[in-house]
Image: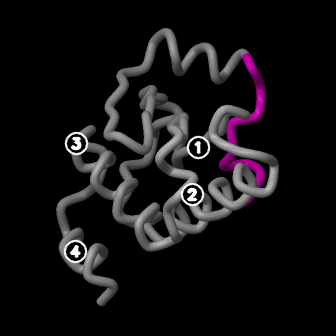
Amino acid sequence: MKKEFRIKKNKEFQEAFQKGRSFANRQFVIYALRKEEQVSFRVGLSVSKKVGNSVIRNKIKRYIRQSIFELNDLIYTGNDYVIIARKPAADMDFFEVKKSLTHVLKVGKVLKKENVGHINRGV
């Protein structure tokens, strides 16, 4: 994921928390904030120390980034997304992370309908 598509500043995270809408499952919480002027979407990641040590946290972030990269064409643009990993995410492999993220994005209705079924089956 390129740097211009990442949320880095604390102010931007706080804005998403306060003004955005949230949706969640057991592994992830996602805040989505509409940004009309944006051409693409941006993603911010938050993985607490409660989830695990630095190796585990970095692994989860890599899995999330790769999942977002693969789901890139299906995620609605013009939004900022803040993804917070919960403790159960520490025990998941890449395919479980991608499936869980796909599920929570569907719950939040920020995933385009086309070809969503193929994602979960790995086709």
Query: Does 9 appear in magenta?
Result: yes
Q: Secondary structure at mark 2?
A: helix
Q: CA distance from mark 1 to mark 4?
A: 22 Å
Picture coordinates of residue 22, whole percent (x, y): 36, 25
Q: CA distance from mark 2 to mark 1?
A: 13 Å
Labels 1 & 4 near each other (Cβ < 8 A): no
Q: Secondary structure at mark 1?
A: strand
The amino acid type, in three-letter code, at marker 2 is Ile
Q: What is the span of residues highlighted in magenta in the rendered image?
A: 1-10
Residue occupying the point 65% across, 39% down:
47
The amino acid type, in three-letter code, at marker 4 is Asn
Dividing the picture into quadrants, the one containing residue 62 is bottom right
Labels 3 & 4 near each other (Cβ < 8 A): no
Query: Does 36 appear in magenta?
Result: no
Which comes sooner in the sequence, label 2 or label 4?
2
The amino acid type, in three-letter code, at marker 3 is Val
Which comes sooner in the sequence, label 1 or label 4?
1
Residue 115's disc is 4
Q: CA distance from mark 3 to mark 4?
A: 16 Å
Give the overall secondary structure of the magenta segment. Answer: loop
